[in-house]
Amino acid sequence: MKIFPSSIQLQTGQGISLHDLMPDLKKTIARSGIRNGFVTVTSQHTTTAIAINEHEPRLIEDIKAFLTRLIPPRDRYLHNDIALRDCPPDEPENAHSHLAAMLLGSSEVVTLADGEMVLGQYQSVMLYELDGPRMRRVSVQVYGE
């Protein structure tokens, strides 16, 4: 079995933003030379998530609104009491982002067959930025033969 490690770096948008990783993942798979196996995609940040969903502009706006209603950024969270934490003074109040990331998850594993990710017609692997804008890094490993 061959293992091909890689990563994707991207600048994310303000607040909650969703980013389609498929173009970069397809390039990584092609470079790997692996035809059959699987691909793991893992966020390297605690205020981002990796999830499979449809990359459609109106749905993206619905997702952003849903997450904001589910975990309101202005609610009181202990993590946001910066004065009581051992952290830099410019640390953002981002407990809501950590909670959303926990619910969404930090990684996905997708089957690879004949050099293609096995996903449904409208599915994309996406990075969910929950506390942007920031420079983000996603770990990608392609395993197989």
Image (cartoon, rainbow, N blue to C red):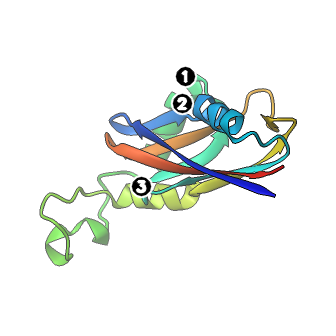
**Residue 54's spot in the image, x, y percent?**
66, 31
Query: Alpha-carbon distance for marks 2 and 1?
Result: 5 Å
Quadrant in the rendering for residue 118: top right
User: Which residue in the protein does label 2 denote?
Assistant: 60
Left or right, 122 with reference to 106: right
Left or right, 63 with reference to 82: right
Which residue is at the front of the view, 94 or 65? 94
The quadrant of the rendering that contains the N terminus is bottom right
User: Which residue in the protein does label 1 denote?
Assistant: 57
**Residue 16's spot in the image, x, y percent?**
41, 40
Question: Residue at left 25%, top 65%?
Answer: 80
Q: Which element is circle 3 on? A: loop
The answer to whether residue 69 is visible is no
Q: Is 71 above or below relative to 134? A: below
Whether the residues at callouts 3 and 1 have beta carbons within 8 Å, the answer is no
Query: Alpha-carbon distance for marks 2 and 3?
Result: 18 Å
Question: Looking at the picture, which amino acid does disc 2 mark?
Answer: Ile
Count of labels shown?
3
Question: Residue pushed farthest top?
Answer: 57
Disc marking residue 47 = 3
Question: Residue at left 13%, top 72%?
Answer: 83
**Residue 28's spot in the image, x, y percent?**
63, 38
